[in-house]
Image (spheres, grey):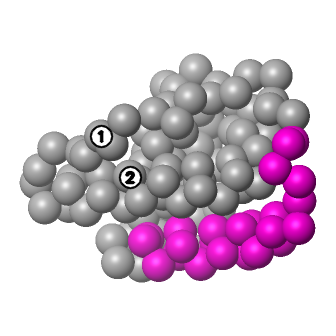
Amino acid sequence: MKNLLRTALLALAPVLLSQCDRPEEQVPPVKLLPREQMVSLLVDMHITEARVEASRLPHDSARVLFREQAKAVYWRHETDEATFRENMRYYATHGKDLEEIYATVVDSIQARQNGGTPVKQW
């Protein structure tokens, strides 16, 4: 789980840094996912990623497994990969929003890891 959180934060850093010079007035995606849905989706994606990592499959097999599992996560959250990516780009241009989303994601994953109830900040 520690690797998952570290990976999530490291993956997020370049996105945030690359968006620093972008205008705050970016047009929202056609289907803007609410923060709560983004949190839930990201929690599920990171847990899925951790499970695939724990499977110790060869890299290519793990990638295929993750893609299939990710499709199931998108389906459960009534979205698709393109919408998810558009929303990540949108929230990345609004650094404070993405920071709050990821703070809740990290808290929720830690709560699950500790056997508690996921944290909701909204």
Amino acid type, mark 1: Lys
Residue 23 part of the magenta-drawn span = yes
Q: Is residue 43 above or below residue 18?
A: above
Q: Is residue 25 above or below residue 37?
A: below
Q: Residue at x 76, y 44 (%)?
A: 90
Determine the image quadrant of residue 117: top left
Cα separation between marks 1 and 2 = 7 Å
Determine the image quadrant of residue 63: bottom right
Q: Residues within 10 Å of mark 2 (few under 14, many from 20)?
A: many
Q: Where are the magenta residues, as a range? A: 4-26
Q: Dot 2 lies on which element?
A: helix
Determine the image quadrant of residue 1: bottom left
Horizontal side, residue 66 vs residue 117: left or right: right
Identify the residue position indicated by label 2 in the image: 104
Q: Residue at x 45, y 33 (%)?
A: 36
Residue 51 visible within the image: no
Q: Dot 1 lies on which element?
A: loop
Q: Is residue 62 above or below residue 7?
A: above
Residue 62 part of the magenta-drawn span = no
Residue 37 visible within the image: yes
Identify the residue position indicated by label 1 in the image: 120
Q: Is residue 98 above or below residue 76?
A: below
Looking at the image, which residue sits at the far left? 115
Disc 1 and disc 2 in contact, CB within 8 angstroms: yes
